[in-house]
Image (spheres, rainbow, N blue to C red):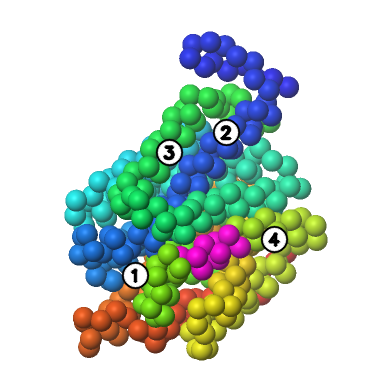
Amino acid sequence: MNSTSTVMGRRLRIPITWLKWGGWCLLISIFMSGFFFRFAPSTLSGSMQQELSLTATTLGIVASMHFWIYTLMQVPAGIFTDSVGVRKGGIIGGTVTAIGAFSFGFAPNLVVLLVGSALLGLGLSAVFVALMSYNATWFSPERHSLVMGTTMLLAALGSVIAQTPTAHLLHWFNWREVVLFFAALTLLATACLLIFCKDDAAPKRIRDSKAKTTVHPILRGNRYVFRERQVWLLFVCVAATNGTLYAFLGLWAVPLLADGFSIQSTQAAQYATVALMVYGLSSLFWGWIADRIGAKKPIIIVTAMLSVAVWALMAFAEWEPGWAAMALFVLLGLSGGPVGVIFAATKETVALANVGFATALVNMGAFLTAALVQSGFGIILDSVSAAEPETVPSLQSYQLALILPLAISGLGVVASLLLKE
């Protein structure tokens, strides 16, 4: 089956399969850049603190600003994308993301840095909803968990690049040049989405569905989503596993290892890199398992319990760099892997017209938690270290702060047990 598309004033007949995967790849590219910007502060923190004189609390606020805005905009982004379509949502989101990245990279002071971080969160909220809606409408339900797992695997590559590769790049480039390079890539992918992707390329069943959808039915459906108990349980589950992981690996993992064990940042970043690689691969693995066994609840329960165990060991056990630390980071990445399964379960809970909104609402759990944990972590460190302001935080200070994600992950276990299959 082919679709007629106009590119540079010329009419081209392009196979639907090409358009399907082409649009997906472009949205994935922008989403990957979003994961880079989300996790880069962990690696760039030292350079940023030195150049702009940031305290631990201020650094936590800068990194969490992305998550706060991303969280607050999930519901509006869901409504917006369900109303205007995937293409417009992706283009607008990608453009705002690129502007935020350029602002962050050129920031001369804290205020502009905060604005850049906020714009990154704003743009990526729309990109996320557009991509999730794209997956829900273009791919069959039987393959949805696997597609979602693949999506998160590829997105995780952006976070992997933000760790060890970026730490090595800082030997040749400053933190601003690294950020600006990825800002340019984001802008390029968005421009390609504008030129090559068309709404009329979608399958007829999807266009017919959208044609019958107006704002009032969407809002009525969204009110139903708010009353759906399963949605809120999934909200807590993704908060417990992914929100805590994003907060820690996105900012505090490298400082904990560097300050707590006096190792180089490049060496510390390797642990976070491994955790993120496992996170991406396990997203694909858990999605495949969910499709094979035809059930999602057991996977969500097992990974929620694993998350509690990892945070408890990090906070209370004696461990150090080497095999012990690597095992903890591997298990941490594995515990965050069911995010695709959680989103697939969300899709099965609501009507197709409200998938974007429901997915955005569940996703709020991860990023609200990430914002709270990143800010709270910094406040705890500054409070505990107030008696010795000229020294870096100790391992014991970091372990005290780790009780915060541990408590949240405990709530995730309770929520997972209450889920319906």
Where 244 falls versus 131 (above or below)?
below
Is the C-beta separation of discs 4 and 1 under 8 Å?
no
- Camera-side residue of 24 and 399: 399
Q: Which residues are magenta?
A: 269-279
Q: Neighbour class for label 4 at 10 Å: few (<14), some, many (≥20)?
A: many
Residue located beneath label 1 in the image: 375
The answer to whether any part of residue 247 appears in the image is no
Residue 278 lies in the magenta-colored region: yes
Q: Is residue 186 above or below residue 388?
A: above
In which quadrant of the rendered view does residue 330 lie?
Answer: bottom right
Q: Which residue position holds label 3?
A: 185
How many angstroms separate mark 3 from mark 2 (CA)? 16 Å
Tell me, for residue 23, which label it has, or none: 2
Label disc, if present, on residue 286 of the rendered structure: 4
Q: Residue at x 35, y 51 (%)?
A: 172
Q: CA distance from mark 2 to mark 1?
A: 36 Å
